[in-house]
Amino acid sequence: MLTVHAHCDLPCGVYDPAQAKIEAQSVKACMEKYAASSDPDFKARAVSIKEARSNMVKEHLWVLWTDYFKPNHFEAYPQLHGLFNEATKLAGAAGTKGTVDVAVADKLIGKIDEIAEIFWATKK
């Protein structure tokens, strides 16, 4: 018996880069709140939430990369693999998980926007 898994464990066909962007915006907001606070407990919570949301960004991006986009998309948009690689790294330890620099979150959001532009072009 072959077991298949999708982002919701049912191949529903519902994908949207907005899920990754919302989480990335949450990451940025946590960074901004971290910078604005002097409370060490609050700052620790902000970092913890930021790191969890960064993981969620990666999960949403991976689902798009591996489940939604097909070989014909990568042929039509040869930059797509690179965009996903850059975006997931920006959400990882060398990116938003490892810093509270809002500029890194902005770069991540920008990469997600580039992916979204291609995503919506494939839906036309």
Image (cartoon, rainbow, N blue to C red):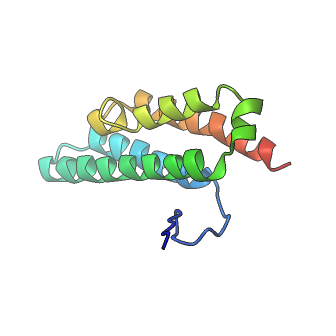
For image coordinates 75% across by 39% down, the residue present is 72
Query: Where 70 falls versus 89 (above or below)?
Result: below
Q: Is residue 73 left or right of residue 44?
A: right
In this rendering, the count of numbered labels is 0
For the point 48% across and 69% down, which residue is it?
3
Q: Residue at x 50, y 65 (%)?
A: 5
**Dividing the picture into quarters, in which one does residue 65 lie?**
top right
Residue 48's place in the image compared with 108, above or below, is below
The x and y percentages for residue 60 are: 50, 52
Q: For this rendering, which residue is in front, 95 or 74? A: 74
Question: Residue 6's spot in the image, x, y percent?
Answer: 53, 63
Q: Residue furthest right?
A: 124
Residue 30 position in % (x across, y down) = 35, 47
Which residue is at a point 66% across and 46% down the rendered structure image?
69
Residue 31, quarter of picture:
top left
**Camera-side residue of 6 and 111:** 6
**Left or right of 109: which side holds 43?**
left
Q: Does residue 43 lie above or below 74 as drawn?
A: below
Percent position (x, y) of residue 115? 64, 38
**Which residue reaches farthest front?**
1
Q: Is residue 115 left or right of residue 25?
A: right
User: Which quadrant holds residue 99?
Assistant: top left
Horizontally, residue 14 falls left or right of residue 121, namely: left
